[in-house]
Amino acid sequence: MSKFSLTPKQIVQELDKYIIGQDSAKKSVAIALRNRWRRQQVTSEIRDEILPNNIIMIGSTGVGKTEIARRLSHLVQAPFVKVEASKFTEVGYVGRDVDSMIRDLVDNSYNIVKSEHEITVREAALEMTNERIMDLLLPPLNNPDKESAEYQRYQTTREKMYAKLMAGDFEDRQVEFKVQEDSSSSAMMQIFSPMGMDDLGMNIQDMLGNAMPKKKKMRRLSVTEARVLITAEESDKLIDEEKVQHEAIRRAEQDGIVFVDEIDKIAVERGGSGPDVSREGVQRDILPIIEGSTVKTKYGTLTTDHILFIAAGAFHMSKPSDLIPELQGRFPIRVELENLTEDDFIKILTQPKSALLKQYTALVGAEDVKITFNKDAIAEIARVAFEVNESVENIGARRLHTIMSKLLEETLFDLPNENTKSIKVTKSMVTNTFKDTMADQDLSKYIL
């Protein structure tokens, strides 16, 4: 079963490996992902009428909104892009235009499809690469007579050298060859568009790149390094570029997922003025993209009707109802993420596959030192993090990174130390590290 056809329960199980709690958010995301697969199994004409139910996740910073998006990008075999709503501006203002999120999505789709095609032509590309490397190691004869003794000796030598090449005997040998440069037009076009060429409606960079001759530069590299560059060139020759672009557009249209973070930053109260007008303008610019519109990209034109949009925001200074009604209606599913508790912090420290304690154990282990945390120490770390969040500002699980960094600061600074082979972190060690900072509320604001 492919990752994209995982059942909702299986998707939640995968997310559980990295994210603690937030069951309702995981369930909503899992159903939305499975519905993408279900829609594709529909064969009748109603298939085009089945639109994705976009999701908006509401919760404080550090509770897992972005982590859910990050894990989704690894979990699904589908084009995925994460953008921040605050980076966009209304048309006519300085900043990124909203169409760029779709162009980024298509870029991601193109890279996925091209990687798949590169795998299918890899063996043929490697054979062609080895032949080119052999030509560099032993240049071909000019207008050879295939019946001559010279040509026979050349072929014998080439066969012997090819066998050595396959055995890896020439990997450190230096070869000189021409490498194609493709940055000639991009540097020049930065003058016209400092924000990057992809933010222009028309891809002028590609137009100039095709019109101007591509330069080649002589490089001297080892056979190992040359193989990487030559294989990429040979793969490009074997891949049907038009087919890749067509498939990239199709996948972005049918399977694409756009995660819009910080959407609360563009929410405004009714009747606002000044900067509020620009934020409302961004909402009105985003609206057609989510409703369904046509966007031009350098790979072709696509429609956004069936792209799944997942938005997230803390909504501390605003609320979802401050979004314009039309935009609210395009996010029918709302999920509120819960603030993390002390018990959640204990689980976050120990249970996920990439738990923070496991990360620090690996870092210290790189110095051939074993570090262990007893249960009381873990509970104390969780307590300190929770209390600082309550007394200073709640930044969720991110507080654990601050606490762990402060706790192990001296340890990480002193290593490597030939007299230290093991470290045991105890409750008293945690308590002593933070007792003065915890007692001084003003100091904790700056240190923790």
Image (cartoon, rainbow, N blue to C red):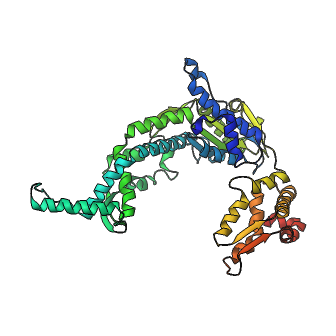
> 119 or 65, which is in the foreground?
119
Q: Position of residue 176 (x, y in %)?
A: 30, 65
Image quarter (top left, top right, bottom left or bottom right) of the C terminus: bottom right
- Relative side of 79 to 269, left or right: left
- Relative side of 160 to 88, left or right: left
- Relative side of 172 to 369, left or right: left
From the viewer's perspective, is residue 125 above or below residue 43? below
Q: Residue at x 66, y 47 (%)?
A: 86
Choose top left, top right, bottom left or bottom right for residue 434: bottom right
> 267 or 63, which is in the foreground?
63
Q: Position of residue 134 (x, y in %)?
A: 27, 60
Residue 88 shows in the view:
no
Q: Residue at x 38, y 55 (%)?
A: 184
Choose top left, top right, bottom left or bottom right for residue 398: bottom right
Q: Position of residue 404 (x, y in %)?
A: 76, 64
> 427 or 103, which is in the foreground?
427
Image quarter (top left, top right, bottom left or bottom right) of the N terminus: top right
Choose top left, top right, bottom left or bottom right for residue 138: bottom left
From the viewer's perspective, is residue 44 above or below residue 410? above
